[in-house]
Image (cartoon, grey):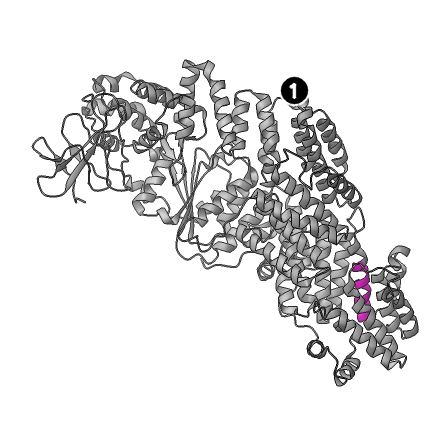
Amino acid sequence: MVSAPVEVNRGSKPCRPRSAIVSSIPGQSATITRRGYRTALLPPTGPGIGLIPQGSRRQGEQASHEWCDPHGRGCVMIQRVRPGFDLIGLVPRRGLFERVGDARVTVVSAPAGSGKTVLLQSWIDAAGLAGRTAWVPVHRPAHDARRFWLTVADALHGTTAGSGLVQAVSAGPDLDEWALVERLLEDLAPLAERLWLVIDDVHDLDTAESLRQLELLMLRAPAALRFVLATRHEVPLGLHRLRLQGQLAEVRGPDLRFSLAETRELFAGAGIELPDAALAALHERTEGWAAGVRLAALSLAGHPDPVRFAAEFSGSERTVAEYLVAEVLERQSPQVRRMLLRTSVLERVSGELADLLTGGSGGERILHELERANAFVSSLDPARSWFRYHQMFADLLQLELRRTAPGEIAGLHRIAAGWLAAHGFPVEAVRHAQAAQDWPTAARLLADHWPSLLMDGATNIIHQLLTDFPAAVLASDGELALMAAADDLRQAPAKARDYYLTLAERAAARVPPERRAHAQLVVLIIRLLAARHGWNLLEATEAARQLKTAEILDGSLLGLRPDLRALAVMSVGATEYWTAHFEDAVHHLQLGVELARRAGRPYLEFTSLAYQASSTWFCSFASAVELGEQAMELARRHGWADEPTAGLACMVLALVRVWRGQSAEAESWLLQAERTLRSEALPATGMSIRFVRGDLELARGCNAEALAAYQSAERFANRLATPSPLVTAAHSFQMHALIRLGENDRAAAAFAALDAHERDSAEVRLSLAALQLARHEPRDAAATVAPVLDGSVPLVWQGMRAQGYLLAAIAHEALGETEAAEVAVECALDVAEPEGALLWFLLHPVPEVLERLLRQHTGHAALIARIQSLLAGSGSDRDGPRLPSEALSDSEIRVLRYLPTHLSAPEIARELSVSPNTVKTHLRNLYTKLGVHRRTEAVGHARALGLLAPIHRR
């Protein structure tokens, strides 16, 4: 590596013919005077330079030469590249570099072609920040906030500073973008080393939700995280606050314009010499516009009369750009010109796809050369296999293609659609088929990949693709009509769901015969999912029955996508779980896990494992724990730990600990489950989590808190369209909590309010027996328990038999029937021992009987010792934060996330596009539910509960 620009003249002796290397200082030029070569300014990324012949070789010839520096300062490499390409180097713009990245937020705002992206990339390279910068390009169209935030998380995770902090997140159907932002804040809270998040083309982020979420991240991120935003125009991000606080740096269009000196430096780096007057005229006519200056440099390279060329063009930026692109294209070989024009229809291009569209070869090599020549082409991935053209350059190429070959455009789109579909890019394939107006192909592609897109959570993309079909095509194509009805169903109020389901069924009937069976199965799955979402268990059960008879579960239906079959099987198993058909549920959910693994669908595997754990709990605590932990391992690996399904897995893991008397571990898992709970949650899930909270508080002896949790579970239950088996259990335990509080009359009233079916259930019978014992009615209690113990009243869970034996033992003890009491307790121990289910012994303690059994050398000595230890330590062991009295709603959570900022209530209202009164109502509800009186208390309490990211040092 040399320490100064190297000049090699004709007197330099070649060291080795046709070999090659150039060294020079990054950011400086090496001047070579040998005919047929010109130097270019080295980019600030490091040594190396490409030069272009001036007609001294045959087309396609490539060669390189190495000269020894006569001054002994090193070797200089000059490499010939394809004709027509100059490596237009990057002029170091150190004055601008000093204005980028130092402030908390830097905005680079200027029209297309102003050099925003080049400036930021060269700033990163010059400052050596490659490993500390997360680069997020916003690609058009950017209708999907979820995909944008997944890209942000992935980019931050890929930095050296963020790799150990930011958790990778995989796509899934239920991901909440606001929760993703909160998770990023939590992950980044310990960030100490400075890290830059660069978002290019922010103006293409065209959803208000995404912009509000980005602003929230900027407001609450740790001081070490800096934001750099590149945009063509102003975006509504509330940057005025940062400007007032002196935390905003702005680089505008005039700042990016090349000075005359910078234009001269760029041209000199490309080996272009112009008289001062001609250079000044060209600079004046381009007005220092970066794209114009770069295009002029490309056009002037090798031009026979550069002075005349510089004087010939004038006009607006667009006119200059069109003229210069035409000049650049004119000077390319036919192969390169053909590739540039035919690939301009693509959002991104690879070498293989370029060759397909041109019918030639060498596309990848040309793309690499274009990128190296800084010719408006940039790579999109570390492997440099995908490239994109600068948007302005692509627009102008498309304009030229429409002018010169309008009849080829539709065919190019069709070819691109076929290649992209075959290589796993269905969304781009559909868009190209639509651009070709090949509506049947576009419809077929979307129908084939629709289930997968749904499972990836790409609902906004699906909606946009559907809207891009003409209305007449949507109405006439059965599969499109089915998807449109499903899309409307997703956004429809509950009362309109039947209407859209009917539309979907009618649409499926119009699908061509060879695809009709597949479409009808899709409708069945939609009906099942809609019924489960609305908690209509009767409809869900019927839809599950039809799926089981439709040859979908045994795999005999040919042509069914593996992921669609996995979804169907998992949905059937989940329905069987909620209807208490646990054995069938375990079978189908195990099959769902296997199919999901085969299909490469981790989210379906995770969901199947969570439901399988919940179903297995009733027959094996150990299996439930193993499956629940597998589900949570998948959740942690993919960033789904805050998803509702993770709440179900955590709930099961907590429940097992509650029954085994492990209150501290149960609390840890239950807090994780409660973090996922919202008032809008599926009522059965919310009811289950609140139910387990009640069990844990009963085990601790916190009877009032237990009662509140069971009442909260009942409020969730009231939203169910069809009663759940869990509702009866919740009523039963609510009676237990009242009895333990000494509220026997209220317990009796609660019993009387139940219908006859519930009163005769095993769970409620056992609660009634506990009430009778509390009222000193042991004979009545023994009579009430007897049908449960002799099997005439069925049990949902056989572990409840232990409760029956304990209540019978207490009744016998009260009646002086000592031996019968001891036999009953032995039976209760027999039932409890295999799983270690000890909760009943805490709710219905029989310490004297246990002591007598120990003296009789019972076979349950170890279990009794454990029970005695739990009884001795019974009582409240709560030392954590007080839990919310009710689940927070999504709207309340959204307001809560703004409380750590300095925004006032009216400002929060503007951010959320609601009225100030609405925000004040949400604040009152938040304070009530959290049991606080001030904003700072609410923030601190929410952080302690894990609802907000922890505080960080600024």
Give the x, y percent position of residue 772. 89, 70
Relative vertical location of residue 369 with respect to residue 901 in this rendering, above or below: above
Query: Disc 1 marks which amino acid?
Result: Ala
Q: Is residue 731 magenta?
A: yes
Give the prevailing secondary structure in the magenta stretch.
Answer: helix
* Residue 176 appears in the picture as rendered: no
- In the rendered image, which quarter is residue 819 located in? bottom right
- In the rendered image, which quarter is residue 777 located in? bottom right
Give the x, y percent position of residue 573. 70, 48
Q: Going 21% across and 25% down the picture, which residue do you hit?
A: 53
**Residue denoted by label 1:** 472
User: Does residue 543 appear to the left or right of 374 in the view shown?
Assistant: right
Q: Going 68% across and 44% down the picture, which residue do you hit?
A: 569
Q: Going 64% across and 35% down the picture, which residue do you hit?
A: 560
Q: Is residue 421 magenta?
A: no
User: Does residue 162 appear to the left or right of 688 in the view shown?
Assistant: left
User: Does residue 525 appear to the left or right of 348 in the view shown?
Assistant: right
Residue numbers of the magenta segment: 729-742
